[in-house]
Structures are given as structure tokens and as C-alpha cells.
Image: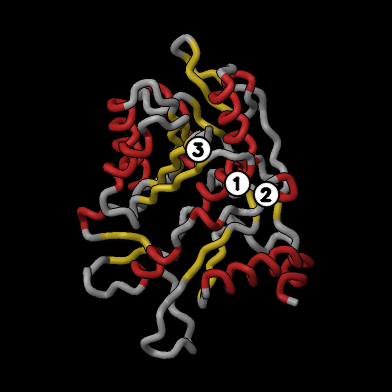
Amino acid sequence: MIQRKKRLVLFLPHRADPDQGIRVSADLTPLELLQIAALPEANGYECVIVDAMVEPDYMAKLEELCDGALLFASSCILGFQVAHGARVAKAIRAKFPKLPILWGGWFPSVQPELYLKEGIADAVALGQGELTFWECVQAIDHGTSLEDVAGLALLKDGRVHYTAHRTVVGFDGIPDVPWHLLDFEKYVALQNDKSTGWKVRHKYADPWDMPAGMELRGFSYFSSFGCPEPCTFCCSPIVTGRRWKAIPGKVLAERILECAERFQVNVFRFQDANFGVHEKRSIEFCE
């Protein structure tokens, strides 16, 4: 008898409001979801990513996937993603009231009580999420308490309860990104779609020497987590504790070259909070 893998449904809300004819640049792939999928995927779970930007009928797909799933998880930053993500989570909660819902990301890490008290999250992962998410998956699967998982905010007796603090770890403790979960050609198609008249936000200028008419195959990448700077305008000091961890320069170069070959990339964008903290690493990467 073939045993079915237990499914984890990972959703990325719209970063901009499509009803206003706005979207973000389609080289912004769902890196946050790919990161947290690495450990469960490596340990035999089925991880399915649904990105609203490239899935026209994302609600129908989510409802199909959530039927029988182990959990639903999402992530967002401040902006339209917050409102859209909340709306989708409420719809999932209404249709699947017993399905555990987890949130993470920058905004939920700063305001976890909003998600817990609105009833759209059973737990919020604070800060770096890879290990926290993996331990949540195991706890939910094995029926143990999420209170034993470090790095979470939970609702207990009507009040927000924080579990033990989780320290930031290096990338050597996390498997490489499971790139096979990414349908990159959907992002390529959207990057090169000139027919819809979208207002595109957060798009970098094309390389100055790119030949006219060449297909754009932009790709985004996380090479580090956190930032050591104390900037008061940013939430990073609160979320990361001013810790910074990065993929070593040589390893990063090898992984970037692998992605470039695999996906035929011609434009790379690093989505790091602060790429250039360690000069020797940057030099090693460039060499």
C-alpha cells in the first residue's frame, strides 16, 4: 500500500492590489515560502506553494489543496499583503475550521497579537522561521503542544503567550532551497507580458547591455538573514536581534551558478536585508 505524503499548503498573498491594476515585479519569487519548505520537503512532506501573483484562481486551488492538508501557512510584509493575506486566511478558516493556520514574516513577527486575536492564526513564528516552522510541522503531525516549540506567539487563555526564545542560526543548519517546488516559467511569462497594462512596482531597470527584445528571466535570491545595524526606522532590530547570518561567498557563488544554469537566468536580484555586511564574503563571492 502506497502511503500518501502529508500536505503542507504554503500561500503568498498579493503584494499589491490587482483590483487597482497594480502588481509587483514578477522576478520576486516566493522565497520566504521556499525557505521554510526546505526541511519538511527533505523529510518526506508534500509542500505546495500557491503564489496569488501567478495563480489567477488561487482561492479554488487553495480550497482543493487544504482539503485533507496537515496545515496552512502564510507570510507577509507590511502593505497590501497584510489585508489580502488576512482575507484569504479568514476564508480558509471558515471553510476548514479545524485546519491549523500558521503565520510568519516581518509584519506578523512585529504584531502577532493581531493575527491571534482575529482568529486567523493558531501560531505566529517570530523572526527566522525555518527551524520554527519545521518543529511546528512535527508538533502538529504528532499531536504535541505548540507551546514546546521555541520562537512562537500563541493565544493562551485569551492572552498572547510567547514560547522560549529562538536564536538565529546559520545557513549550514538549513538545507538548500527546494527549487523544484518553484514553477519559474510562470514568473518568466508574467515578466514578459506586455499586453495587460499593469502598473509594475519594485522592478529594477533592465541591464543596460540587454539586447532589445530579449526575454527577461529575472530571478530573486536570499543569501543572508538579518542585519546588525540599529536603524530605528526599521523593524529588523526587533525581529532579528541585530543578528546576521549568511551563506559563505564560495558556496553562494556555486549555488547562484547552479540556479542560473537550471533556470536560464539573465538577471539576478538579491532580496537580502543587508547583503554587504561582511566584506571578505562579498569579495570571495565576486572572485
- Determine which quarter of the picture holds residue 26: bottom left
Dots 1, 2 in contact, CB < 8 A: yes
Tell me the element at label 3.
strand
Q: Is residue 54 left or right of residue 28?
A: left
| Vertical comparison of 124 with 252: above or below | above
Q: Which residue is mark 3?
A: 104
Circle nearer the viewer, 3 or 2 = 2
Q: Alpha carbon of mark 3 to alpha carbon of mark 2: how far?
A: 19 Å
Tag 2: amino acid: Pro
- Determine which quarter of the picture holds residue 118: top left
Q: From the top left corner, tell me how far across and down residue 12 is, in percent.
A: 41, 47
Residue 6 appearing in the image: yes
Picture residue at 57% right of the left edge, 35% below the top: 133
Q: Which residue is mark 2?
A: 175
Q: From the top left corner, tell me how far across and down residue 171 is, in percent.
A: 70, 50
Dots 1, 3 in contact, CB < 8 A: no
Picture residue at 79% right of the left edge, 67% below the top: 280
- For marks 1 and 2, the one nearer the N-term is 1
Label 1 Cα crowd, 10 Å radius (few <14 / some 14-19 / many 20+): many
Picture residue at 30% right of the left edge, 72% below the top: 193
Q: Is residue 111 left or right of residue 19?
A: right
- For marks 3 and 2, the one nearer the N-term is 3
| Vertical comparison of 139 with 223: above or below | above
- Determine which quarter of the picture holds residue 68: top left
Tell me the element at label 2.
loop
Label 2 Cα crowd, 10 Å radius (few <14 / some 14-19 / many 20+): some
Q: Which disc, if any, is residue 38?
A: 1
Q: From the top left corner, tell me how far across and down residue 197 is, in percent.
A: 22, 70
